[in-house]
Image: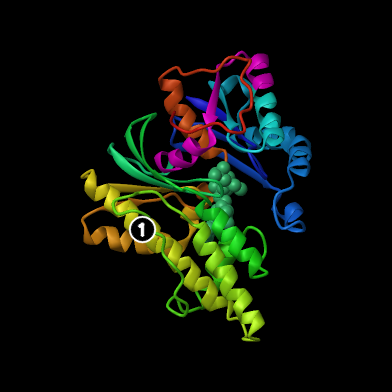
Amino acid sequence: TIILAIETSCDETAVAIIKNGKEVLANVVSTQIPTHQKFGGVVPEVASRKHLEMMNIVVSEALNKANLNFDDLTHIAVTYGPGLVGALLVGVSCAKALAFASDKPLIGVNHIEGHVYANFLVHKEINLPVICLIVSGGHTNIVKIVEHGKYEFIGQTRDDAAGEAFDKVARSLGLAYPGGPEIQKRAELGCKDAIDFPRSWLEAGSYDFSFSGLKSAVLNYLNQCKMKDIEINTENVAASFQSAVIEVLITKTINAALESEIDTILLAGGVSANSALREEMTLKAKEKGIKVLYPQIEFCTDNAAMIGAAAHYKAIRKEYADLDLNANPNLKFGV
Ligand code: ATP
Ligand code: FE
Ligand code: MG
């Protein structure tokens, strides 16, 4: 397969061309982050308009980089949810137009499944079943990948997603959007045992997560400091917060792997770019004889290469979409 994949679910206009699910012939990401930074978060209306401005330019750039034209492609793939409806619609409309005009099959991809498939894009051999921790701006899940396209759900967040917690805590510390990388930078300079923030383990044996209590604990701590006129050490707050998040993520994911006797863990989604999460998960899992795989940073955060990789396995199964494919902002994963 040679798949042109489009991703516009949030604030990146991305187009990639992927050969056989593995070879990245082009991977273009036009980010809107600087535009949204002024507002401290993504403004949906602005995002849609920016996608519209960039869409055709990014498609042409990807074809140029790959040195291909439309005739060389075998399929057109696109993220159709979850995400911002207006943003998704730009990509979906473009993909449908390209598929119709070039008479190629259209493949609709779930954005979260795309994050998972970033791993299959970059790692030569992954023997299924594996346990996958999905940690992104809107999702926190532990899933078992039984076979391609077949998932069993083990745990999920009951409130905030991990990335959302990073973004909200960063905002309360006066750090820029997106908060994850900013927290990581500060955390590297701080002491993770400085402040004893709560770990939310929930009921014994549960693989679910909850991050809103931790977020409130950080806000309370900051307010207390302000009231008592104590100087806030941003590095220590960042390190202690980050440590509280990743300790729970690591423990539950490894337990899930042990319980299902699986020796490989995949990390997926924007928060899997976090170096402390990657390193500590790898160390702790190794003690139990479990291998941890994750994509390079550029394939952790939103991109279209991961959508092209997921689409490859759908193409093999001939899971095609009709031209009435619609954007679904609340698209569920694996159900
Ligand atoms: P979803 O994929 O759930 O629809 P999204 O697409 O907005 O949401 P991603 O783009 O996958 O989310 O990831 C963005 C999130 O990842 C943000 O919350 C961001 O703060 C977080 N993130 C990015 N880099 C890091 C990092 N180094 N450490 C921690 N968090 C990070
Ligand atoms: Fe994402
Ligand atoms: Mg994003």
Q: Can residue 24 be seen at all in this image of the molecule?
A: no
Residue carrying label 1: 250
Image point 68% across, 15% down: which residue? 101
Few, some or many residues within 10 Å of mark 1 (<14, 14–19, 20+): some
Image position, residue 71 (x, y; %): 60, 19
User: Is-magenta flag for residue 106?
Assistant: yes
As drawn, 47 above or below 97:
below
* Range of residues picked out in magenta: 96-120
Instruction: Give the dominant element type of the magenta stretch: helix, strand or loop.
Output: helix
Image position, residue 230 (x, y; %): 62, 86
Image point 65% across, 27% down: which residue? 92
Quadrant of image for the C terminus: top left
User: Is-magenta flag for residue 2?
Assistant: no
Image point 50% across, 54% down: which residue? 162
Judged left or right of residue 216, residue 286 is left
Judged left or right of residue 297, residue 285 is left
